[in-house]
Each structure stands twice: as C-alpha cells, then as structure tokens.
Image (cartoon, helix red, strand yellow):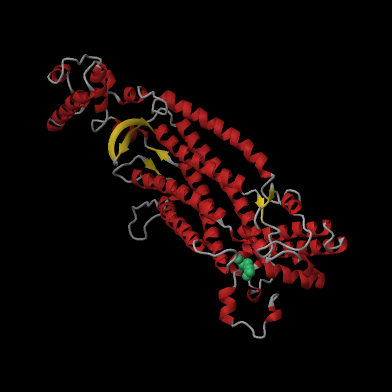
Amino acid sequence: MKPWGGRFTEKTKDIVDKFNASISFDKKLFYEDITGSIAHCKMLEKQQIITHQECEKIIEGLQIILEEIKSGNFQFREDLEDIHMNIESRLIELIGEDGGKLHTSRSRNDQVALDIRLYVKKNTFHAAELLLTLIDKFNQKAVMTQDALMPGFTHLQQAQPILLAHHLLAYSEMFKRDFRRFITLFENLNECPLGAGALAGTTFPIDRNYSANLLGFAKPTSNSLDTVADRDFIVEFISHSSIFMTHLSKLSEELILWSTSQFNFVELSDQFSTGSSIMPQKKNPDIPELLRGKSGRVFGNLISILTILKSLPLAYNKDLQEDKEPLFDTVETIINSIIITTDMIDELKFNFDTLKYWSGKNFSTATEIADYLAAKGVPFRTAHRITGEIVRMCIDHSKQLSDLTLEELHNFSPKFDSDIFTFITPESAVNRRNSYGGTSKESVLFQIENNNHFIKSNISKLKTLKGDIICSNI
Ligand code: ARG
C-alpha cells in the first residue's frame, strides 16, 4: 500500500504511477532529504515529541539509508513516487513502525521545499566558487598578455586599437557581476521552510528556530502558505545562470570567429576541438559551439519554471514537482560550462603578430587625427569631417594613414605638424586612452590590480560562508 493509501479503495493505474512519480530525477535530493530529516528528528526529540531512543533509532536508520544510496545498494521504487516516500518507507522497513514517527508535524510539502532549497544553496555556492576561478583565469591571461595589441570592434567592423588584456578583462567584469548575483542569492537563501507543514503550520509544539539553526539557516520562513509555494529562488538561480550563459555564448562566438583562418587571432587547443569525419584538414571549435548552444537550454529552463509558477493558486500544487528537472539540468549545464571554459581559456593560444598587424589596419587610428585637430582648437565636428576626407583619399589611393606625408596632410589642414605621426600609431592610440576604465596599459594594470583584490577578498568571503552551506551543526 502507498504511504497515503488509507482512504483509497482502488489501486492507481500503472501509467498513473509512472506519470506521477518523480523518483527517477528527485533521487538526486537524497542527501538533502536525509539531512533535513535528521534535523527534524533532533528537533522532535528536543521538544519531547518523540523520545531519545526513538530519535536515535531513526537517525541510525537514516544513516544506514544514506550509506545504501551512496554505495548504490538502495532499491528506488517508482510506486513510492518520490525520494521522500522511498526513504521513509525504507526507514520503516529497517527500524519498524517507529520510523513512521519521523513524519510527525511535517508534510512532504515543507520537506520538498527544504530539500530543494538546500540543493540550490549548495549549488549556488559551488557556482560562485567556480566563477571565482574563471575570473582569476581571465585575470591571469590579461597579466600574461598585457602588452599585446589587437583591433577593437563595434558592429563587428574594426574600430579602434585596444589592448588584448582590456578585451579579456571585459569578460572578468561580466563574470564578476555573475559572481555577485550568485552570492546575493546564496545570502538570501537563509530562511528555513521546515515546520510550515502541508500549508498551515502544525499543532505540535515544534521549535522552528532550532531546526533552522541545525541546517545552517538564519531563521525560519515567516508564512507557511508562502513557504510551501515559494520557488522564487529556483527562478533566480536559473535567471542568473541564463545571464551567465549569455556571457559564455558571446565569448564562444568570439572564439569561433577568431579561430577561423579569416581572423586567425587564436588557436584553440586540440583538447577542445574535434575533426571532421570527411574533411581531413578540419579542426572544428565544437566546444565553444556547444557552450553557445547550451545557452538555449538554460533559457528554455527559465521559461519552463516561470510558466510552471505563473498561475498557481496558493499553496502547494503538484505542478511544483516540475520545478526539478529544469533546475537540475541548469545546475549540470552551468557547472560543467564554467569548468570547461576555465580550462579552455587556460589552453588558448593567441596569434600576437596577427593581432598586432590588424590593430593598425583599416584606418583604426582615424579618431586620433580628429582628436589631434580638436586638441588644436578645431571644433570636433569639423575635425571629424576633415579626417573623413583624409580616409576617403586613402581609400581612393590604396594608402594607409601611416603612408601619408605632412604635405598631403596640409592639403586638409594647416594645423598638422610632424608629431601627428607619433599620434597615429596603435601603441600611442592605446596608451593615450587613459581615461578611467579605458584601454591604456596603466588603466589595464589598474583593472588587474582591482581584480586581484576582488578575488582575494572573495576567497575569504567564501571561506566564511562555507559553514552555512548545509547542516553545519548536524
Ligand atoms: N514529489 C513532490 C514534489 O516534488 C513532493 C511533494 C508532494 N506533495 C504532495 N502533497 N503530493 O513536489
């Protein structure tokens, strides 16, 4: 008989058992479920709702089950629906009827809300830890390439020369924002659902602060109806993950373009590329392509969870069982994506000569000419027009800006002196962009320094938060 079977006279159909069951995926929550049960059991004992002996027996049973699951010796049963009833039923099998006391003053509704919250908390922390290594990797690459020039783009058209390190550090900024979002989510997940019951609380004299504390939460949640219905933290996790995946997808797109023979800016390591089954010469950027593609599944997961939640009446509804697969898929996708990206960036080789060559091509320093004239009192709009005419002339005569003579420049403005030629080198264009956050070497070194500080202070922050991940007091 099912644990809830008392009021039923007919058996559920096989197809209903299958459709209703979540055990095939929610078995992932076994550790959170058992930990939550141990905390609940300790609270029941402290409040004299169960005896000391009963508490010991239950915890011993739960620990045996934990070992059985970890070692692959646990028989998961679909007819027992989910992880909660699989564990409870095995507990009763192991220690007898007293096992049934564990569920006193608890419902699967607050139980699952707790399990999933602990799971999100653990993985939010893990994502933040890994993001910090990714930020560090980009920062290290920026240190290693700090003098390298490259062309900067807007509209994917060559715009102005920049430092390669500046480009890499743009990604550090994106990942720092991702990191902060995950840490804020972690810090906001500090309320414990346990004790909300099915929807309305319980008649037993429970101590919710005690179980919250055992599980590493700052306090219990405030409203039992909201508690069993709230999955905002899943939306936040998947939303933060989606934003992060847009960053990875942009990075991947650049690596795919940059590794073409047309760009030839980078070479991906063989470890992150594959060949073609028909064209022997091919080396394909499959891993960045997959990272770019995987953003699609994470965005899909976000739409799933939002749609599941949007018209649910209070309080618990079985629709909420559908929250898990999008979440689990997102966790797996982003954790693997961060690890693989960190490794791929570590192995990435830049073609510095090509990058430097293109940094000075395509009139990339035309802005310097306009700025030069503007600094000599020519209104910027006029300076811009004059420079445009110079560029037009160069295009017509197949010349680069650096090929021009002073006489030729004087045809456009008498303000030009011979020092103009030192202004229009890519090096000078870069180093004169010394505004805060600009691409000059000085500014780049300042960004690197700030990132070092960010990484260091957040390593210690993570150390202090680690105790809160899960059940520090159990
Ligand atoms: N497997 C269920 C879920 O994931 C557990 C809660 C079931 N509660 C209920 N009242 N049927 O949401």
**Total numbered labels:** 0
Tell me residue 439's x, y (percent). 38, 28
Q: Quadrant of residue 317?
A: bottom right
Residue in front for this viewpoint, 14 or 262: 14
Q: Is residue 17 left or right of residue 297?
A: right
Tell me residue 460's x, y (percent). 64, 36
Q: Is residue 124 left or right of residue 143?
A: right
Residue in front for this viewpoint, 183 or 159: 183
Q: Is residue 105 above or below residue 458?
A: below
Tell me residue 314's x, y (percent). 58, 63
Residue at 37% x, 60% y: name it.
277
Residue at 12% x, 19% y: name it.
411
Tell me residue 313's x, y (percent). 55, 65
Asked whether the viewer can see residue 271, the reply is: no
Residue at 64% x, 76% y: name it.
79
Q: Is residue 251 above or below residue 100?
A: above
Quadrant position of ligand 1: bottom right
Asked whether the viewer can see residue 418, the reply is: yes
Q: Is residue 209 left or right of residue 333?
A: right
Q: Is residue 45 above or below residue 343?
A: below
- Of the 4 image quadrants, the one containing the N terminus is bottom right
Residue extending farthest to the bottom is: 10
